Amino acid sequence: MNPARAWRDGIRRVAGAPLILAGVWLMTTLVSLPLTLALRGEITNHLGASLAAETAASGVNYEWMQEFADQATGLGTTLKPTILGFGAVLDNLSAFMDNTSRPLVIVGAAGAYIVLWLFAAGGIIDRYARDRATVDMRGTVVVERSAVSDDDLAWIQGRLVFRDAPLILVGAELYRWYGVRLRVADSSLANLHLTASFSGEPVDRVLNVIALSLGARIERQGNVAILHRAAPSGARP
């Protein structure tokens, strides 16, 4: 995937989940709002009803900003031109490279924000990455956007889940989970689909359930399981 296509795909995924975008904005606002209100209070107390207050309200008063920084402590020391726009990122990077300490309240807010992201990142990545790729009988790869369900992620919990799965997929999963290859002796069975769920059952139990679900019978030869059409009632296999 080229960079432009990857960028467009990322925009599409974000636009497809506006609640997550709103949630990230809300999380950022909740962390930064207390700091904003605290700094606002310090500025208000320093300016009062002075002429500098009118100048600061109408634009940037660099001289007052220097005066404020000289007498400020804690959070107030961060009020300087470098916090505007992308300058804040460069200022933090410079402080990190120069091993310059930040006020404790800033460090605490940053730590809280990182912790919140640790909790939220897994769900966000899971939501944006739920694409499913399948291979049809002709070998063509088909990608379904945002189609992955909880059943597709059941393997994380040690569960093997099939939902209307073709036998070629069933065979691949059986080999991956149990090291048993599934072969179909009767071509009429090849187009059947399986819906079943397993959670730690032994391979023989799994094979028997598959055979019963498909109306077939299983013949086990070592690490190979051969699927035969079930014999008619009263007939010998």
Image (cartoon, rainbow, N blue to C red):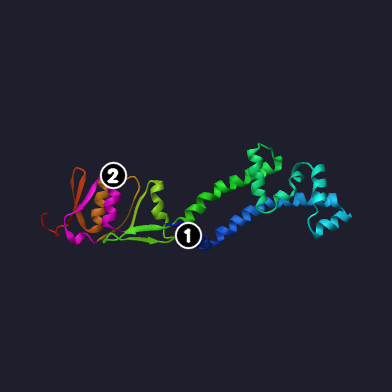
Over which residues does the magenta segment extend?
A: 165-191
Residue 111 falls left or right of residue 147: right
Q: Residue furthest right?
A: 50
Please tell me whether mark 2 sits on a helix, a strand or a loop: helix
In the drawing, what numbered circle is on residue 101? none
Where's the N terminus, which quadrant?
A: bottom left
Determine whether, in the image, residue 52 is placed left or right of residue 75: right
Foreground residue among 190 and 106 = 106
Q: Residue 4 shows which numbered tag?
A: 1
**SS for tag 1?**
helix
For the point 76% across and 44% down, the residue is 77
Residue positioned most to the top? 99
Which quadrant holds residue 163?
A: bottom left
Q: Is residue 23 above or below residue 222?
A: below
Residue occupying image coordinates x 67% and y 54%: 85
**In the image, residue 186 lies in the stretch drawn in magenta:** yes
Residue 121 in magenta stretch: no
**Residue 96: image location, x then y, percent:** 64, 40
Location of residue 190 by image quarter: bottom left
Q: Nearer the viewer's eye, disc 2 or disc 1? A: 1
Q: What's the distance in space between the residues labelled 2 and 1, CA to CA?
A: 42 Å
Residue at position x 67%, y 42% in the image? 108
Looking at the picture, which amino acid does disc 2 mark?
Answer: Tyr
- The residue that disc 2 covers is 178
Query: Dot 1 surroundings within 10 Å: few (below 14), some, or many (20 or more)?
Result: few
